[in-house]
């Protein structure tokens, strides 16, 4: 058995680890970067694009430089200067909007459908092969098909989010509903509760923790996938922004984007965690 | 002759490769308390589920109030063995849920007040806002009892309601249930493994042989005067004869009588005995 740890000691240790990490990073780059860059691999040069052709910039920024840049970006996160130059806040908002839209539509379909599948062993058996085949497909594999049929890059990204977040919610809802204890259903039956009352007052609360787990997995996957999807379709969003900064060889901006993506992902997960806590029950 | 409230007429229940029981007949009169005693696996729960309408017989019919039972009904409430409370609801909400099923037009305030009264009746006035996980086993079963009685059914069906409780709590709850059933003039049917519980509560005790092909071997009439109190029950004349008779049945005769019935056995009228005189 592990002993419980006090929160402030863990926090203190976290800060020490962060300080050591950033300090080592800063020191290791001290004095470096002034000399000419190493001879460049031609394939790597191709990936770098035009910015690299002009070449010779510092390959890796120091934490202090990143911090300075972060301050710059966050002091005006929502500016719009033309379609290709928008603040980081705007970009994150675009990504969040797509994720919430795709995830929301997926939830609206997956939860009722999962409910029906969970209640009907026949439907469960009939739909299972389709789900099993479609679920392991990488969401990005849908992208060309989406672009071809929808003919709109932004909606295609939403579709990819939809398709990747539907499966965990569908499967968890179906499982949660089918696993509702027989005795609660019997209570509802002896009380002549009726289909709707049983569905909303017994099955839904009983399965809610399992459904919420599915939603939490889904939103995590959706946030992972949006970055890749936006790199592909371009235009707006934090994924596009990362790719753009890579083309500009702004490594500091890329580090900041990684931090932002992590923090937003954490916030989304916490939000769903709070919801899960609200519907949790204990026997 | 008045018709019994519940009349079990020649029911059987078959699972693939297993006939749990076949051609079972008995009746439960209005206001009567009947206990069903038998060994594990003989089909007691199956019979209770059929009476509740949760399961259907493979053959035969069960009449309640003269009409064939085709499904569960608010007229026949069930007190489940494992309390079966919904863990996401408080004690009060559990009872209010049942009340809301019966009285579709009541608003939340009225349901809450009625649920409170039902819980106060079983001595849980202080635990209204507690979730089942915060209640002891006895308190949980009390909520289950309050929930069943709150809908004012005509009949109470109980499947070993106290078997998971300690002796002291069990005694208290037996008296509770006995009082509530009597107050409401309800008909009651209870499955039990506890011989004393059967003697305390039942007017008649049905003894079931071991399965498969279980049958009601005997109907024991409990002639001990009412009201019976647990503390003094074993001092009543006739108590030991009654108890010994049921124990003998459970220990040996439930086994020796299993299978082919004796020649003079009439499944419609199993022999009635009153060992207490
Ligand atoms: N759904 C089912 N499918 C197959 N067999 C079943 C099913 N339900 C019950 N049985 C069988 O029917 C028989 C009677 O079961 P039942 O639960 O009625 O017994 P019981 O008398 O209530 O036993 P206990 O005292 O242990 O509760 C058992 O042999 C059981 O295995
Ligand atoms: Mg049983």
Image (cartoon, coloured by chain):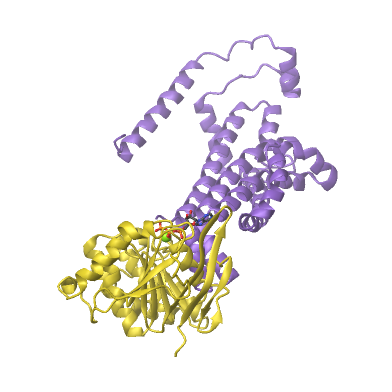
Chain colours: A purple, B yellow
The quarter of the picture where residue A161 lies is: top right
Image quarter for ligand 2 equals: bottom left
Furthest-top residue in this view: A39
Q: Residue at x 54, y 66 (%)?
A: B12
Q: Is residue A206 above or below residue B69?
A: above
x then y, percent, for residue A251: 61, 26
Q: How many marks?
A: 0
x then y, percent, for residue B45: 45, 63
Is residue A233 something that shows in the picture? no
Q: Residue at x 27, y 66 (%)?
A: B245
Residue A267 falls left or right of residue B87: right
Furthest-bottom residue in this view: B1
Q: Is residue B24 above or below residue B1?
A: above
* Quarter of the image where the N terminus of chain B is located: bottom left
* Quarter of the image where the C terminus of chain B is located: bottom left
x then y, percent, for residue B167: 23, 62
Q: Nearer the viewer, residue A147 or A20?
A: A147
Q: Nearer the viewer, residue A251 or B205?
A: B205
Furthest-front residue in this view: B263
Q: Is residue A217 above or below residue A10?
A: below
Is residue B172 something that shows in the picture? yes
Residue A31 falls left or right of residue B111: right
Residue B190 falls left or right of residue A173: left
x then y, percent, for residue B104: 52, 80
Q: Nearer the viewer, residue A232 or B82?
A: B82
Residue A175 falls left or right of residue B35: right
Q: Is residue A51 above or below residue A42?
A: below
The quarter of the picture where residue A112 lies is: bottom right
């Amino acid at each position: 058995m592990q002993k419980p740890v006090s929160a402030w000691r863990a926090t203190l240790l976290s800060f020490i680890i962060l300080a050591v990490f950033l300090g080592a990073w800063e020191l290791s780059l001290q004095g470096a970067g002034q000399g000419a860059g190493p001879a460049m691999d031609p394939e790597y040069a191709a990936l770098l694009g035009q910015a690299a052709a002009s070449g010779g910039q510092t390959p890796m920024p120091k934490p202090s430089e990143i911090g300075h840049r972060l301050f710059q970006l966050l002091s005006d996160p929502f500016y719009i200067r033309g379609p290709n130059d928008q603040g980081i806040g705007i970009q994150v908002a675009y990504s969040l909007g797509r994720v919430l839209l795709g995830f929301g539509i997926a939830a609206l379909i997956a939860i009722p459908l999962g409910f029906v599948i969970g209640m009907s062993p026949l439907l469960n058996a009939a739909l299972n092969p389709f789900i099993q085949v479609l679920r392991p497909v990488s969401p990005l594999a849908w992208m060309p098909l989406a672009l071809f049929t929808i003919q709109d890059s932004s909606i295609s990204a939403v579709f990819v989010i939809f398709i990747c977040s539907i499966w965990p919610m569908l499967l968890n809802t179906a499982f949660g509903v089918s696993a509702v204890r027989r005795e609660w259903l019997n209570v509802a039956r002896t009380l002549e509760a009726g289909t709707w009352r049983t569905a909303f007052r017994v099955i839904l609360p009983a399965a809610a923790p399992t459904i919420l787990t599915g939603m939490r997995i889904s939103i995590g996957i959706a946030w992972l996938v949006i970055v890749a999807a936006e790199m592909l379709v371009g235009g707006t969003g934090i994924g596009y922004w990362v790719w753009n900064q890579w083309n500009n060889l702004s490594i500091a901006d890329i580090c900041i984007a990684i931090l932002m993506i992590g923090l937003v992902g954490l916030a989304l997960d916490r939000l769903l965690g709070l919801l899960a806590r609200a519907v949790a029950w204990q026997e | 002759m008045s018709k019994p409230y519940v009349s079990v007429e020649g029911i059987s229940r078959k699972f693939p490769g297993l006939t749990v029981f076949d051609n079972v007949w008995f009746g439960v009169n209005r206001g009567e308390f009947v206990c069903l005693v038998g060994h594990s696996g003989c089909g007691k729960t199956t019979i209770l589920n059929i009476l509740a309408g949760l399961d259907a017989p493979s053959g035969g019919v069960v009449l309640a109030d003269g009409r064939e039972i085709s499904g569960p009904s608010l007229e026949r409430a069930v007190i489940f063995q494992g309390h079966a409370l919904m863990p996401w609801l408080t004690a009060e909400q559990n009872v209010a849920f049942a009340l809301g099923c019966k009285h579709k037009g009541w608003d939340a305030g009225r349901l809450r007040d009625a649920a409170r009264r039902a819980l106060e009746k079983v001595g849980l006035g202080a635990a209204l806002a507690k979730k089942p996980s915060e209640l002891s086993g006895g308190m949980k079963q009390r909520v289950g009892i309050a929930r069943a009685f709150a809908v004012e059914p005509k009949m109470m069906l109980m499947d070993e309601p106290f078997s998971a409780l300690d002796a002291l709590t069990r005694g208290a709850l037996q008296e509770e249930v006995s009082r509530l059933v009597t107050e409401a003039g309800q008909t009651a049917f209870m499955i039990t493994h506890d011989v004393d519980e059967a003697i305390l509560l039942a007017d008649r005790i049905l003894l079931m042989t071991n399965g498969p092909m279980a049958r009601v071997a005997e109907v024991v009439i409990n002639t001990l005067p009412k009201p019976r109190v647990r503390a003094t029950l074993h001092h009543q004349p006739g108590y030991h004869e009654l108890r010994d008779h049921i124990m003998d049945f459970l220990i040996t005769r439930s086994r020796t009588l299993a299978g082919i019935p004796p020649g003079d056995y009439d499944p419609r009228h199993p022999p009635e005995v009153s060992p207490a005189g």
